[in-house]
Every structure is written in structure tokens, then in C-alpha cells.
Amino acid sequence: MKPESIKSLRASIVTLQAERIAIERQPLSAAEVGPAVAESVEQIEAVFNVRAGLALRRIAGGQSPVTVLREVFNGPDALAVTLVGVLGAAPVADALLRQIGTVPKGLDAAARTARLAEIGAELDRLEIAEERLVEASEAAGAPIQRRDDCRPEVVLGVIA
């Protein structure tokens, strides 16, 4: 039994697991962020328009402007709604997207799905090979300890 073989398999497994985690942590590519920001800011602008209309109708109905504005433009989203309402959706989106260079390039949805499938298939192959080496080492009387995170379905032979 070559210890290098198990070490090489495990190094490859760790590398692929890390890549999978990185891909899963960035569900949008940098190219997809722009449209997502623009859509979100437009939605916030729509919220502002509804709230502003409500506030104006309440003020026109004789309610105190200060009280109405405090009530209507209050809450966890108050700053965002007011900022977008006052400045407009496009300038706020443009200001946010000036920082797009800080976002990793990432993969678009199709490439992300394909790469995650490739990683899954390669992890299956590597982990099955690793389990075979572990089993062979046990049969040879020189057992190799399993990784703490080895998948039960591989150990039990459900995936073979």
C-alpha cells in the first residue's frame, strides 16, 4: 500500500471540496451582480413611491406631516428607501456598482451548475478510490484511518 496514493487522493478531495464551497458561497457571478442590483434598487424605488403617495394622501387628509413622515419612512429599510427615493434608482445602482471590481468574477448560473456537477462526479470517483484503498489496507493488516468527513454512502458502498 502506497501512502502517497492515499495522500494524493485526499489532497485532491480537499481541493475539490474547497472549490465546491467557494462556488456555493458565490451564487452570482460579477456579471450577474449588476442586473441584480439594478432590479433590487428599482424595487426599493417602487416602495418609496408607494410610501410617498400614502404619506401625501394622509397629509392631505389633515394628519401632521411630521408624524406621517416619521411613521411612513420608519423601519429597518427606511434609509435605503429614502436614499433611493431622493436620489433615484439609477444613481444609487451606479454608486453601488462602482465597487464591482471587489466582487470575484465567479461563474454564471449554467457554468456554476455544470462545474458543481463535475466536482460531484469527481468527488464520487476519488472517494470511492480512497475507500477501496482503506479497505485494502485493512485486509492487508495495515489499516489506514478514514477521514473524519468521509461520506457514509461511500463507506457503505451505496455509491460504487
Image (tube, helix red, strand yellow):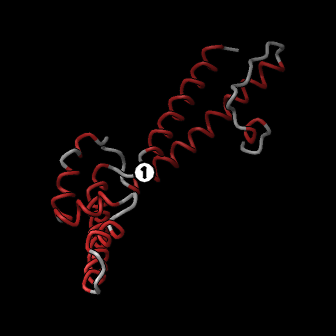
Residue drawn at 30 percent across, 42 percent down = 103
Based on the displayed image, in which of its 4 quarters is residue 48 positioned? bottom left
Side of 121 where 129 appears, left or right: right
Q: Residue furthest bottom?
A: 61
At horizontal 60% and vertical 18% (from top left) the residue drawn is 7
Q: Is residue 45 left or right of residue 153?
A: left
In-image side of 12 versus 51 (left or right):
right
Image location (x, y in percent) of residue 104? 31, 41
- For image coordinates 20% across by 57% down, the residue present is 92
Q: Is residue 107 above or below residue 47?
A: above
Residue at the spot 36% in from the left edge and 63% down from the top edge? 74
Give the position of the C terminus as an image quadrant.
Answer: top right
Q: Position of residue 123 (x, y in %)?
A: 59, 38
Q: Is residue 33 above or below residue 65?
A: above
The crowd level at tag 1 (other Cα within 10 Å; few <14, some 14-19, many 20+) is some
User: Residue 22 is drawn in which quadrant?
Assistant: top left
Q: Which one is nearer the viewer's eye here, 146 or 33?
A: 33
Q: Residue 157's x, y, as percent? A: 78, 40
Observer-nearest of 4 and 60: 60
The N terminus: image quadrant: top right
As shown in the figure, which amino acid type bears the numbered disc 1?
Pro
Residue 148 lies, in percent from the top left, at 70, 27
Question: In the shown orientation, is residue 26 left or right of residue 50?
Answer: right
Q: Secondary structure at mark 1?
A: loop
Question: Disc count in the image?
Answer: 1
Dot 1 corresponds to which residue?
A: 27
**Above or below — where is 132 with respect to 35?**
above
